[in-house]
């Protein structure tokens, strides 16, 4: 993601939840995961903080 827009808490929750589901189903992780961290939601949160989640939310017009 080249430009990170401000997201509402609902968009943030939806994006992180979708990414956590992907990770739980075996998608590759996009960040270095600390030893012992196995919870997909925590990993998705780590990816969100680093800004590497490959999911975009489109706005309604």
Image (cartoon, rainbow, N blue to C red):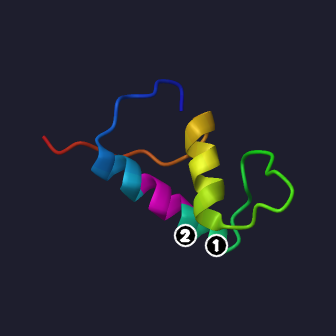
Disc 2 vs disc 1: Cβ atoms closer than 8 Å?
A: yes
As drawn, the label of residue 21 is 2
Name the side, left or right, on which 33 lies relative to 24: right
- Residue to which mark 1 is pinned: 24
Mark 2 falls on what kind of element? helix
Considering every residue shown, the one lying at the far bottom of the view is 25
In the image, residue 17 above or below residue 48: below
Q: Main secondary structure of the magenta part?
A: helix
What's the distance in space between the residues labelled 2 and 1, CA to CA?
5 Å
Q: Residue at x 28, y 41 (%)?
A: 8
Q: Position of residue 48 (x, y in %)?
A: 55, 43
Q: Quadrant of the C terminus?
A: top left
Numbered range of the magenta stretch = 15-19
- In the rendering, at what x and y percent does residue 59 appear? 23, 42
Residue 14 tag number: none
Taking 14 as reference, is 54 left or right?
A: right
Drawn side of residue 58 relative to residue 2, left or right:
left
| Residue at 64 percent of width and 75 percent of height | 25
Q: Name the image quarter holding residue 51.
A: top right
């Amino acid at each position: 993601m080249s430009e990170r827009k401000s997201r509402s808490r609902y968009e943030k929750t939806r994006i992180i939840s979708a990414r956590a589901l992907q990770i739980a189903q075996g998608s590759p992780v996009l960040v270095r995961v600390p030893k012992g961290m196995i919870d997909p939601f925590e990993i998705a949160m780590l990816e969100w903080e680093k800004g590497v989640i490959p999911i975009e939310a489109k706005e309604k017009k």
